[in-house]
Image (cartoon, helix red, strand yellow):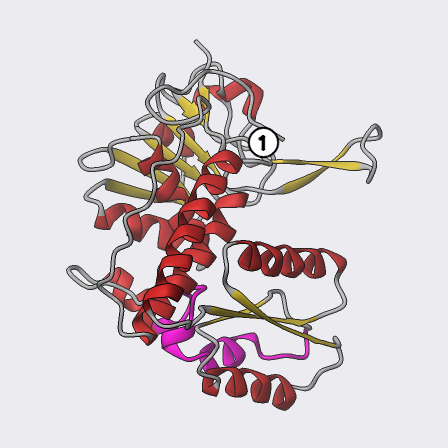
Amino acid sequence: MSATVIDGKAIAAVIREELKDEVASIVEKSGGKIPGLAVVLATDRKDSLTYTRMKKKMAEEVGIKSFGVELPATVSQEELLKVVQDLNANPEVHGILVQLPLPKHINEEEILAAISLEKDVDGFAPTNIGRLAMKSRSPMFAPCTPQGCIELLDRMEVPIEGKNAVVIGRSNIVGMPAAMLLLQRNATVTICHSKTPDIPAITRTADIIIAAVGRARLVKRDWVKPGAVVIDVGTNEEPDAKARNGYRLVGDVDFEEVRQVAGMITPVPGGVGPMTIAMLLKNTLISAKRSFGMEHYKHTTRLLPVSPSFGPAAQRSAPST
């Protein structure tokens, strides 16, 4: 048995095409109003610069106006707060993302809390997380990476209701909100963490596993029951003398081992990562529709061709790169 590889890159590309159609429709219906996303960078880290440029590029590709704010790593708390406040007040901006991590001298919690709830497209505001945790309540936005995990399950037509789901990791960014999203979908959810004894015994009961703990190749073949769906959120650098940068990216799951027993599995890279940006763009569009008074407007998306690498006709093949 070899698992179906969930091609997150291909699924994210389809979602961006759907968003592009909907953005164009909304611009037409609203008389020319354009959704806007502001990405704030306050660091000199090359990886953060790459991420922010990628987000801006993809926003523009789907028709979302990009507002890029690049600040030096020496920016003060007051200066950064002023930037966020100005973006809050800008009616052309419907989503604000502050790229993390921030410099050590910056109070990250205060900066994130300053983002208007209506523009918190990252979904990390305490009010959004609180609503996510409460029964019969809905957040303004769900955090992008956990939402991307759920979207992958939905696009692959994986049933969630009534299934046993195990989330490995309890971070505020992925683990906790992922567990809450699964619970909202009526899964029976277990969260495993550093103090959980005998994690493999727990994961072997799972129909769905989401690994988000930041430990390379932690999840082994004998952790997974036959046919389980495994979503790997981990991104870890592993030394590789043959790689151009001297390392390669691997997930929290031992992919080659686990694919021999799982029913479906996401690769790293090319699995959850592309979905995070797709969900960011989706949240920005939701925010813009609220701002335009079009919250209940639903665009009928043109039928897109279904890739053979996902969906009901999924093939057991390697993902696109």
Seen in the picture, residue 256 relative to 41 is either above or below; the reply is above
- For image coordinates 54% across by 30% down, the residue present is 267
Seen in the picture, residue 252 relative to 111 is either above or below; the reply is above
Q: Is 199 on the left-hand or right-hand side of 217?
A: left
Amino acid type, callout 1: Arg
**Membership of 119 in magenta stretch:** yes
In the rendered image, is residue 296 in sight? yes
Q: Residue 177 sits in which quadrant? A: bottom left
Q: Is 321 on the left-hand or right-hand side of 295?
A: right
In the rendered image, is residue 170 in sight? no
Residue 140 at x, y = what percent?
31, 67
Seen in the picture, residue 212 relative to 299 is either above or below; the reply is above
- Bounds of the magenta span? 104-126
Residue 81 at x, y = what percent?
57, 86
Q: Residue 216 sits in which quadrant? A: top right
Characterize the local packing of mark 1: few (<14), some (14-19) or many (20 or more) Cα atoms within 10 angstroms: some
> What secondary structure is found at the residue carrying circle 1?
loop
Residue in the foreground of this view, choosing between 5 and 299: 299
Residue in the foreground of this view, choosing between 2 and 287: 287
- For image coordinates 38% across by 69% down, the residue present is 288
Q: Which residue, given by chain and number where applicable, does mark 1 sit on?
A: 217
Seen in the picture, residue 297 relative to 94 is either above or below; the reply is above
Residue in the foreground of this view, choosing between 248 and 97: 97
**Membership of 42 in magenta stretch:** no
What residue occupies the far left of the structure in this picture?
136
Task: Give the quadrant of the C terminus.
Answer: top right
- For image coordinates 53% across by 37% down, the residue present is 9
Task: Give the quadrant of the N terminus.
Answer: top left
Number of numbered labels in the structure image = 1
Q: Residue 188 sits in which quadrant? A: top left
Residue 271 at x, y = what percent?
52, 36
